[in-house]
Amino acid sequence: MEKLKIIQDYCRQFNLSGITQFCQQALQDAQSKQMSYSDYTVMLLKHEAEIRQKKNLERSLKAAKLPLKHDLGSYDYTVDNGINKTRLKQLIELNWLDQLYNIVLMGPSGTGKTFIAAGLCYQAVTAGYKAYFRTMEEIVNVLKMKDFTRTALADYRKLVKANLIVIDDIMLFPLDKPAAVALFNFVNQLYEKTAFIITTNKSPQQWAQMLNDEVLATALLDRLLYRCEVISLKGKSFRMKNRKTIFEND
């Protein structure tokens, strides 16, 4: 037991938390199965690697800031909203991400835009990509505050190194000129090295109204639509169709 404690102390010194926790069990397994030194070493290192991968994924998912509902495994394909099972599976394969294609999910509120975008972001994170989910309001706030607060600057630095950025509900509300220019500069800086997923309930023509600048809206759309798949969703709001009530049925 004294040697076990020494091993654990060394593991803590070298930040081998997985081996620290697994060390005693590993010794017992090695003795009972009469493992060779090499097999025992491989077992320890494999466990450490698995623990680190798990922690890295947990950190990446936390940084992604996904909404609660993002599991595309529960997607209801019986809903006729304009995207079928084959197309969604192709999107889940993420080939478009490696090719730096953008995805624009366009349609009325409640047709599944945010759910699909969050699900694809989750798939990207679990596949090892740097992927982040943000609303347009969050993006605008980061761009506005990055020169004033450490939190905003840290988030900005993550975003500019991303493989994928989801901008949810873009053009949901009007932007003043400084915010519109900042958003354009952000997209312009990244569009050749980062893939975007955009969700919006506004047509391209309405973007000019939200930005109050047709030239700026055209330039922004030009960057986003250059290499892009536009998916138009339709139908009635899923949330309104499945609206909850506090009252029991009479």
Image (cartoon, grey):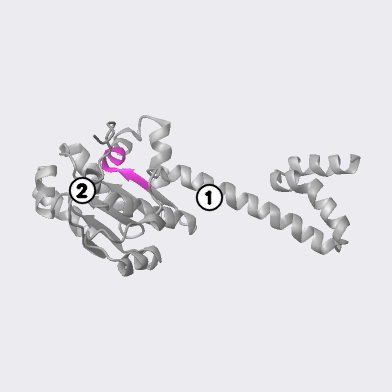
**Residue 161 appears in the picture as rendered:** no
Residue at image position (25%, 63%) is: 83
Q: Is residue 235 left or right of residue 90?
A: left
**Residue 90 appears in the picture as rendered:** yes
Residue with the mark numbered 1? 57
Quarter residue 88 falls in: bottom left
Residue at image position (85%, 41%) is: 6
Q: Vertical placement of 246 versus 127: above or below?
A: above
The image position of residue 165, as x and y in percent, is 35, 51
The image position of residue 105, as x and y in percent, is 24, 56
Q: Main secondary structure of the magenta part?
A: helix
Quarter residue 103 falls in: bottom left
Q: Residue 165 carries which label?
A: none
Residue type at numbered disc 1: Leu
Circle 1 packing at 10 Å, graded few (<14), some (14-19), many (20+), is: some
Specify the quadrant that holds the N terminus. Answer: top right
Residue with the mark numbered 2? 237
Q: Nearer the viewer, residue 235 or 175?
A: 235
Magenta segment: 133-140
Q: Which of 112 and 181 is in front in this view?
A: 112
